[in-house]
Amino acid sequence: DLARMLEAESDADLELDVEGRSFKVIRAILCARSPAMRAQLAAGLEKSTDRVALKDVRAEPFAVFLRWCYTGELDSPHPDLLLATLALADRYLARALVALCVDELLSRVADDSADLALACLQLVYSSPGLVAHPPVHKLRLLCLDKATAHFLTFAARHPDRLEAFAAAAPAAMIQ
């Protein structure tokens, strides 16, 4: 079973260093799941390279990404980690993982306060690639509805966060 292979690091032919954390992986599994990862590994690396440092990647969402690569499943992480995983899935062009993250966020936003809706909107509007994914459109609309319904309450409680959101996602404020 692939999940056990990931945990046991058996048959690993590549070691990825992410924020000082080492992930021993099977190159073919990553390349099969992520066209961007395939291109990244092929562009600057020879097959003989067995250790690669990934820059600008956080270890926690990368661990969730790896587990998905091996199992096709998304463990339901904390909302902040889920958002970071969504951004990473978009970066690595992992459309199926984007869809899983969006599905999970849809259910959480529906049951949560406006805080998560605003965090989702900030990510969506700051990541142009995400808008291209059809499931993200539904998430964006739900988040806009949720944020609008709770706008005054949120603005009164968190004026600094609202100001930061407006600076990061001005298009969302217009909508």
Image (cartoon, rainbow, N blue to C red):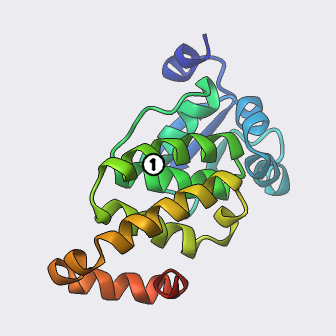
- Name the side, left or right, on which 152 lies relative to 38: left
Q: Is residue 138 above or below residue 97?
A: below
Q: Secondary structure at mark 1?
A: helix
Asked if residue 90 is positioned above or below residue 171 in the image, the reply reads above
Label 1 Cα crowd, 10 Å radius (few <14 / some 14-19 / many 20+): many
User: Does 151 appear above or below 24?
Assistant: below
Q: Residue at x 55, y 18 (%)?
A: 3
The residue that disc 1 covers is 105
Quadrant for residue 87, please give it.
bottom right
Which residue appears at 59% of the width and 23% of the height? Answer: 71
Q: x%, y% of residue 48?
A: 80, 38
Amino acid found under the numbered disc labelled 1 = Leu
Percent across and percent down for residue 18 are 50, 50
Q: How many marks?
A: 1
Camera sees residue 20: no
Q: Residue furthest top?
A: 1
